[in-house]
Structure formats: C-alpha cells, structure tokens
Image (cartoon, grey):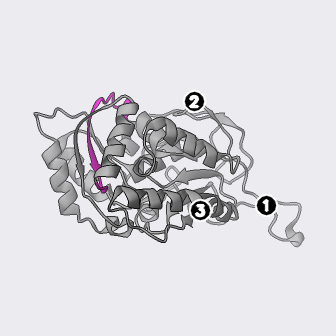
Amino acid sequence: MVQMSGLKNDKGGDRQPHTGSLSKKPVSIPSACVSPTPSLAPVTYPDARSFRQRFGLLVPATNTTMEHELWSIIFANPDRDGLAGVGLHTSPVLTPKPDVSSAEGVEQYKLQFLGDVEAALKSALLAAPQYMIMGMSLEHIVYGIEPIKATMAKIEQYCDLSWATWHDAVKVALDCYGANRIGLLTPFEKTGNDSAIRMFQDLGFEVVASFGFGCGNAQHIAHIPDWAKEKAVMEMATAQNKLDAIVQCGTNMSMIDVTQKLEPIIDIPILGINSVCFWYALRESGFCGPLRGGGRLLREF
C-alpha cells in the first residue's frame, strides 16, 4: 500500500507541502479554511462538505460520465478512513461541435477543447480547489507523448495547483503491476485509436490488442452499452494474447461496473481512465488507504 508523508488534517487546516508518493514531485495542497463572516473572525473553518479536499475537475461539456463515476467512488467510501469530506468541483470545457467521426472532426474538436481550457479553468478556480484533475483523453486529440506533455505543461501554467493527468496516472498504474503487454479499449474512431496506441507505445508499453468503438460524436460515447465493452474485453483477454492489463481510454465511457465484474474473471487488472486518474489524484494528495468501488488498483495500491 502507498505510504505518504504530509498527510492531511481531517479538519481541513493548513497542510505542509509533501512529495507525491507516485510522481515523486512536490505537491502543495493549499488550505481551504476561511472565516465565513466578520462576526466569526479571526477563527477559520473548513468547507462544511469538502472539509478534507476540494478537487477541481475539467471535462468536455459533452461529458456525462466522469463526474458521476468519481462521485460513485466517493460515496462508496463514506467513512473517515475513506473519502469523507472529499468534494468534486467540475467545470465544463465548451465543445459545441462534438463531431469526431473523421480526422478533420477530431482536429476541430481539439481546437474547441484547447481553445476553451483556460476559461474553464478560471471558472473552476472560483471554487478554490486544492488539486486539479484533467478529465480528458488528450491522446484523442494530440498525437505522441511529447506533444501531449507539452500541451499539458501550457495548461498547468494557468494556475499553481498540481494536476492528475491520464498519461501520468496510467503509466504509474501499469508500472505498479509490472505490466508491459496491454490490451487497449477506446471509444474512438481510427484516428483517435491510432493516436492512443501511439501514446502507449511512446510510454514504453506493447499494445498487443486494441479495439475502438468508432463513436462519431463525443456525446454518444456515454451510450456504449456495458455488454459491448464486456465482449471487447473478453475477446482481448485471451491466453494467446497473454496480456498483463487492459486499459480503457475516453472519460465519457463508463468502465467501473465492467471493471468490477470482469477483473475477477480474467484475473488481470482493468485500468479505466476515470478511476485511474482519481486514484492518482487521491494518492498524490495523501489519501493512502484501500478504496472500494473502483477496481483492483484502488484496493491494492
């Protein structure tokens, strides 16, 4: 199990900077305590609901899945040793033309998303979050790990907070299992699916099998039925493929229920983007205990 220094004060008081147990980078979680009224000054109080941590979450405006899945993990761990006092504060990134049925459509979607990220982040910061989560598969719209990192570096310059990103989180998660041979499940059409394969190859993993559902509209990703995801997982998780893990991209594609159902059957981890990004954000922020509702990774590391 992950061990961390600088554990948070459960009452939301000031916390010292610490080194993230996963990234090995400095992580500073600013205090969210304030004096709510002049009559109560100079005493400060934590947020009544998000008294342990406020997470800011950026998602495309078409996304109806990621926030729901992250809240489901929070609600599955309501005690003090779990995620009591953790809150999500979501800001949508405007993507008014969600057509991703072609390379041209993906490029247009990229311009929409990256063009509105700064405005969405400014909106999110009004809630005074203490840590940010990027709720977007950047490999869908940016080709290659170095351009992905460069894109995220520009976004990180907009604020002083630490971020959980998919490319960082999944690399650490796969390394936790010593995984090399992976199966890749995405909602993307060929352009996006090829870009996802490229990212994992750049990260040093062998993509043995992949399946993309070919969704032509970003809104429609949320409508992929679980039976179809289960079928794709089972077709990849064969003795011949000898996979170390199955990885799922696309934050609007729900995977938690499929993960919890199939992991005991196929006996390898299923790493869905939403639970993996939240796992990374929690561990980096000092939440060290095993967690329910998100699959093996949250229980085991």
Part of the protein shown in magenta: 174-189
Judge whether residue 67 is colored magenta.
Answer: no
Q: What's the residue type where badge 3 is placed?
A: Asp
Give the number of the disc on residue 116: 3
In the image, residue 262 sits, relative to residue 222, either above or below, namely above
Residue 174: percent from the left, percent from the top?
A: 36, 34
**Residue occupying image coordinates x 32% and y 69%:** 220
Q: Which mark is residue 237?
A: none
Tag 1 residue: 34
Question: What residue is at 29 percent from the left and 62 percent from the top?
Answer: 215
Nearest-to-viewer mark from 1 and 3: 3
- Asked if residue 202 shows in the view, the reply is yes
Q: Earlier in the sequence, mark 2 or mark 3?
A: 2
Residue 61 location in percent, x, y? Answer: 49, 68
Residue 86 visible in the shown view: no
Q: Secondary structure at mark 1?
A: loop
Give the Cα separation between the discs numbered 2 and 3: 30 Å
Give the alpha-carbon distance from disc 2 to disc 1, as whole Å.
30 Å
Q: Amino acid at mark 1?
A: Val
Reply above or below: 121 against 264: below
Locate the C terminus by quadrant. Answer: top left
Mark 2: amino acid: Lys
Q: Position of residue 214 (x, y in %)?
A: 26, 59
Label drawn at residue 24: 2
Looking at marks 2 and 1 on the same chain, the residue that comes earlier in the sequence is marked by 2
- Horizontal side of 277 relative to 159 (left or right) equals left
Quarter of image, res 26: top right
271 sits left or right of 119 in the view: left
Q: Nearer the viewer, residue 159 or 3?
A: 159
Q: Residues within 10 Å of mark 3 (few under 14, many from 20)?
A: some
